[in-house]
Image: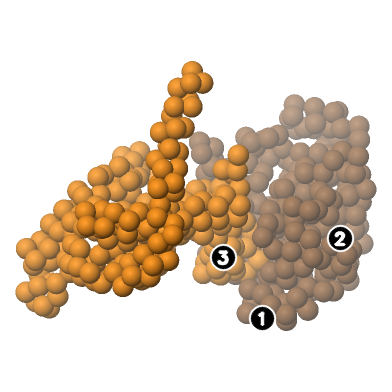
């Protein structure tokens, strides 16, 4: 039993140990300062930040709806929850293909955008952001929904009896109470967006400086310059560890070991 | 009971409410005049808290009306009724200090944070909360939280005060003292006051008359002495017998 558990732990940890052990530490500064790396780095941070912002704007109201759906009839409630959960279980490539079917030049909406407005979505930085939003939105929604559910709804009623309008209740009571959940959701959302690969490469391609994000650059470098690929992988690992540490101490007290 | 000085200026409450909570239909009608608090008493699940919530506008009425003086309020949202509520377990804002809890109503009226805090200052002093002003609700004892809840509600200058089981969150040892203190504050408020409780001792200390609610219906109304003289139901008899507090 314990032996299996140790094996499982090894499965999780050993690859990362190998990554760190085999990293070209001496050349790291030079590798990370390369034009292609910096380009991917900037693009990744800009798109993941934009995707997180978009997820916040879209996700907080959706989380509110989901939390309220607790008293809906079973069927619509489960359908709503399933719709939000789909991107979590769907292979990202499928998400990318689905986005193409919707927004591609011959897609359901994409053809209209192309014909009427001359707007092409796929293979742009905007497409990168959309692909990231598609895969990372559920993380934000579920984190915020959890916070909404655990907040005492009676505080909102109390605020109303003290003269707070609906907007004031939201602004002064609901939002501050769910802020830790929103922050945790945003961080998870950002890290998921930063690591996005499958949906991005399918829907947005791999144009240097436009759609070639860190994970894609890392994958491509593996074929030409493994050292650069490892350097990029280390960078992504560092960001993930930072996210984990940040979440543990500040935003997810419930998950502390 | 001596009506407090401002009570003559305060309106009375007329409540005639019918609400549905789950399977149960709850109907109660009563008038409360300023300076003569009414205790709504009854077993758990009788619908006492729902009656208060309906008056405050937190649950919708199936039928009936709520009037404060000549002002009909049942069509208004809670924030426009001028009804102060001390909730069961107090429901303080956990993210705000004692000072900002008490300043909340002033803040909602559109004042700046510092202006609202200035408004809260005399209320903090009056309820002996100045030393606790920077604490968060989680750092308060039950009795302290009760004072904050009362100060928060009264700082909004309500016409009517509703108290939902105000003593139930307190330790038994401090209850008698807190009851006397609360009675003083309720008297000072002087407006129409309705108290929900299941304790005859609370009713005796805090209210002039009692309304008994059982399974959603009013079964008796009168002073405690009148209830003792002629209990209308087995529940009233048992309740009065059990309370030798």
Kindly indicate which chain is depicted in brown in the rendered structure. Answer: B
Horizontal arrangement in the rendering, residue B226 relative to residue B153 (left or right): right
Q: Is residue B119 above or below residue B129?
A: below
Label 1 and label 3: CA atoms lie apart by 15 Å
Q: Is residue A205 above or below residue A76?
A: below
Q: Secondary structure at mark 1?
A: loop
Quarter-of-image position of residue A11: top left
Kindly indicate which chain is depicted in orange in the rendered structure. Answer: A
Q: Residue at x 65, y 52 (%)?
A: B52
Q: Residue at x 39, y 67 (%)?
A: A30
Horizontal arrangement in the rendering, residue B90 relative to residue A180 (left or right): right
Q: Which residue is mark 1?
A: B111
Horizontal arrangement in the rendering, residue A84 relative to residue B146 (left or right): left
Q: Residue at x 36, y 64 (%)?
A: A31
User: Residue B146, can we see it?
Assistant: no
Q: Work out whether residue B3 or residue A20 is closer to the camera in this orientation and state it.
A: A20
Chain under numbered label 2: B
- Residue B50, numbered label: none
Q: Secondary structure at mark 2?
A: helix
Q: Which residue is mark 3?
A: A169
Q: Are marks 1 and 3 on the same chain?
A: no
């Amino acid at each position: 039993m314990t032996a299996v558990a140790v094996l499982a732990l090894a499965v999780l940890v050993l690859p990362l140990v190998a990554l760190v052990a085999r990293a070209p530490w001496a050349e790291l500064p030079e590798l990370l300062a390369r034009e292609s790396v910096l380009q991917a780095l900037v693009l990744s941070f800009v798109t993941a930040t934009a995707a997180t912002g978009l997820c916040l704007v879209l996700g907080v109201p959706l989380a509110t709806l989901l939390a309220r759906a607790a008293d809906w009839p079973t069927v619509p409630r489960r359908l709503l929850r399933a719709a939000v959960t789909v991107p979590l279980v769907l292979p990202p490539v499928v998400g990318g293909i689905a986005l193409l079917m919707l927004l591609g030049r011959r897609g359901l909406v994409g053809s209209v955008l192309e014909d009427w407005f001359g707007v092409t979505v796929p293979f742009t930085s905007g497409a990168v952001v959309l692909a990231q939003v598609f895969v990372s939105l559920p993380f934000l929604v579920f984190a915020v929904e959890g916070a909404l559910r655990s907040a005492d709804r009676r505080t909102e009623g109390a605020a109303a009896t003290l003269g707070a309008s609906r907007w004031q209740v939201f602004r002064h009571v609901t939002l501050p109470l769910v802020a830790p959940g929103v922050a945790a959701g945003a961080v998870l959302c950002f890290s998921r967006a930063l690591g996005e690969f499958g949906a991005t490469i399918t829907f947005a391609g791999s144009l240097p400086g436009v759609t070639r994000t860190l994970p894609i650059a890392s994958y491509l470098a593996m074929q030409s310059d493994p050292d650069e690929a490892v350097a990029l992988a280390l960078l992504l690992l560092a960001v993930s560890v930072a996210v984990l540490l940040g979440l543990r101490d500040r935003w997810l007290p419930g998950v502390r070991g | 009971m001596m009506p407090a000085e401002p009570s003559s200026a305060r309106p009375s409450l007329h409540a005639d409410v019918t609400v549905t909570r789950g399977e149960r239909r709850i109907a109660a009608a009563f008038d409360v005049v300023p300076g003569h608090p009414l205790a709504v008493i009854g077993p758990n699940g009788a619908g006492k808290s729902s009656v208060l919530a309906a008056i405050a506008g937190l649950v919708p009425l199936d039928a009936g009306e709520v009037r404060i003086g000549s002002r009909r309020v049942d069509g208004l949202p809670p924030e426009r009724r001028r009804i102060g509520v001390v909730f069961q377990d107090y429901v303080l804002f956990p993210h705000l200090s004692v000072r900002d809890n008490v300043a909340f109503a002033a803040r909602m009226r559109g004042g700046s944070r510092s202006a609202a805090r200035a408004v809260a200052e005399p209320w903090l002093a009056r309820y002996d909360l100045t030393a606790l002003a920077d604490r968060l609700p989680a750092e308060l004892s039950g009795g302290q939280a009760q004072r904050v809840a009362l100060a928060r509600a009264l700082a909004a200058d309500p016409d009517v005060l509703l108290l939902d089981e105000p003593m139930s969150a307190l330790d038994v040892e401090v209850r008698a003292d807190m009851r006397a203190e609360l009675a003083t504050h309720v008297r000072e408020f002087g407006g129409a006051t309705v108290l929900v409780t299941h304790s005859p001792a609370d009713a005796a200390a805090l209210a002039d008359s009692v309304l008994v609610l059982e399974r959603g219906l009013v079964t008796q109304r009168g002073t405690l002495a009148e209830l003792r003289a002629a209990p209308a139901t087995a529940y009233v008899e048992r309740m009065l017998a059990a309370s030798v507090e």
